[in-house]
Amino acid sequence: MESGSKTEENVGYSSITAKKAQLQSMLSALLDDPILFDVPKKPTLADVDTLINLELGSAMKISVTKVDNTSFDVAVLNSATVKDLKLAIRKKINEIEQAKMGHRHISWRHVWANFCLAHHNEKLIDDNSMLTEYGIHNNSKVHFFPCVVSRASHKHSKRKKHRFFHGLSKRS
């Protein structure tokens, strides 16, 4: 009786593996279709949802120009904020770099500390502002702009030195 259930498990396992392999081959064939060129190679549900919203008109495509004058497109919802745009840019650049060079770490803290996004020479400084407040709409262009944030506007104060041995000499 036990051997019969193991055989059923093996058959069930192999059929699941076969179904996954078939799904992967269908998905890769679908993604190779020229009509779906803007779908990432490993799409998430959020990626597909944003692309559907783009087709329905409730999302916008924004062209981003890097400092080296290369550009790429990202899609964000019409209700997106500057922070949402930065996250979409981060994801797209990481995806591009991964395809070109394999694993590569980019310090986004360094990027955003030295550059900001600009649209028609207006800097997109406030992360919580809506993109529409800056006049950004479908097919708009934004670019990276050198921008040094002053120390006064940093949210975190300077780290205080820990004085572990302070006071030990007084006790002895």
Image (cartoon, rainbow, N blue to C red):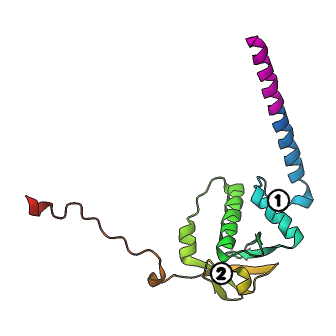
Does the magenta segment cover residue 124? Answer: no
Residue 142 is tagged as none
Which residue lies under the disc numbered 1? 39
Query: Residue 143, position in %: x, y?
Result: 69, 79
Image position of 37 (left or right of 149): right
Residues drawn in magenta? 1-16
Q: Please tell me in which quadrant of the rendered image residue 159 appears.
A: bottom left
Which residue lies under the disc numbered 2? 129
Q: Residue furthest left?
A: 172
Residue 23 drawn above or below residue 155: above
Q: Is residue 67 visible?
A: no
Which residue is pictured at 61% across the width and 77% down the height?
127
Residue 167 drawn above or below residue 116: above
Q: Amino acid at mark 1?
A: Val
Which residue is pictured at 75% across the width and 83% down the height?
136
Image position of 67 (left or right of 168): right
